[in-house]
Image (tube, rainbow, N blue to C red):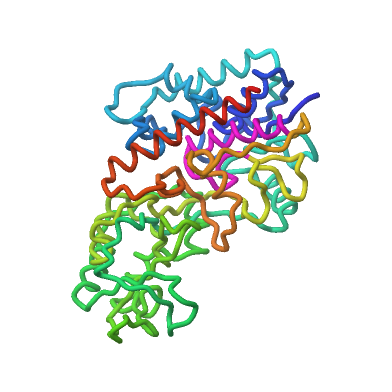
Amino acid sequence: MEIKVIGAGLAGSEAAYYLAERGYKVALYDIKPHKFTPAHSNKCFGELVCSNSLKGKDAYSNACGLLKEEMRILGSLTMEAAEYAQVPAGGALAVDRDKFAEFITEKLTAHKNIEIICGEVVSVPEDRCIVATGPLTTDALSKSISDICGGQLHFYDASAPVISRDSIAFDNCFFGDRYGKGGDDYINCPLDKQQYEEFVNGLLTAEKAVLHDFDKREIFEGCMPVEVMAARGFDSLRFANLKPVGLKDKDGNRFYAVLQLRKENAQGTAYNLVGCQTNLKFGEQKRVFSIIPALKHAEFLRYGVMHRNTFINSPQCLNADFSLKSNPQVFFAGQITGVEGYVESAASGILSAIHLIEKLNGKAPQIPDVTTVIGALSAHISGANVDFQPMNANFGILAPPEKTIRDKKQRYAYLAERALESIKKYKSNLDK
């Protein structure tokens, strides 16, 4: 029995290796080294764009660090490669990119159960496969995926920042929907004229992230960054995403401008800055949005991003085990599912392989629970979400503590201990 894995980035490499280590024959397809996407140049598999792409390594203060520890417990190839290629970088898990990719490539090419096939796959196989082709999936395969998903395929990622509910200054905001409709779905963050002027000036003077040419074609035709809107005139935001019309607090006060926050998850632990998709550098986002009084202490769970990123509308198309609702023999993994980041992509590769094995053995899928980062990401890609956007690892997507823990450091430590205990139980159940 052969399993096809399409794409040898981190997600595909993880999936192929996990399957092969458990005795399954794998055909691993990739266009390298004969062709490259616009973002790649290394002929090896598992290519990273920079040495610190794997982010922080402390599991107790950094959600990505916690996710990496969960992956180690599950037997991650990415974590093996990172340990082998690690270079000193303080609290970051930085690596020598060439050594990292060479390690992964050697592990895959030398494995007796993996056959490497260099070539472009132009359509999705009908069974026993994992599609892990990443944010720059080739045009032909993108069309095939789009057809299978009923057009539910996005070609760019333009998302607004997400902040922790616990960090909102509630003495500077109020709940309520526009014109009093729909209950208290939104948190409204008012600004007076002086605050609004400072915010607009902050947007106009902030440093922007550099886009690749292949990003620019897609993004600005489909979604307007908040800083570009602000540049069109001083009052432009007041007549767009910061319009105050129909909003007043419990005392009947009206305001010069209002930024709205909307729940990002069912638990209400994370809130999205409505209409604030942005291409500002991360540090600049924190500085500028913190000008808004209600966000003066904001903890950013995810910064806004704008780049080319082909991804599925996963809540509509995928089950929690990363299989297609329309064909449960076909699995997806990596950024194409709507997990954001290299580590998150690799984690989804492990899960897709785990669940495919369960499917082949006639077992019901065991989904890690939302006390773990890896389980919370699974819930994000499969839970009801009418405005689905990619999500990275952050403590805000985990199930909240069973008790209130005010101190952030202590709260994160508790969440990490709980997650590691949970993922160990999950691994133990898989081994039975």
Q: Is residue 340 magenta?
A: yes
Label tally: 0
Residue 130 quadrant: top right
Q: Quadrant of the C terminus?
A: top right
Left or right placement of residue 250 versus residue 394 in this view: left
In the rendered view, tell whether residue 425 sits above or below residue 208.
Answer: above
| Region in magenta | 333-358
Q: Position of residue 284 (x, y in %)?
A: 27, 54
Left or right placement of residue 112 versus residue 420 in this view: right
Residue in view at x 69 percent, y 12 percent: 112
Residue in view at x 56 percent, y 26 percent: 45
Q: Can the viewer see residue 397 in this picture?
A: yes
In the rendered view, tell whether residue 301 sits above or below residue 93.
Answer: below
Furthest-left residue in view? 194
Q: Position of residue 37 (x, y in %)?
A: 56, 38
Q: Position of residue 354 (x, y in %)?
A: 65, 31
Residue 321 quadrant: top right
Q: Quadrant of the N terminus?
A: top right
Q: Is residue 23 magenta?
A: no
In the rendered view, tell whether residue 198 sits above or below residue 278.
Answer: below
Q: Position of residue 54 (x, y in %)?
A: 41, 32
Q: Can the viewer see residue 53 in this picture?
A: no
Main secondary structure along the magenta-highlighted residues: helix
Residue 239 quadrant: bottom left
Left or right placement of residue 202 versus residue 351 in this view: left
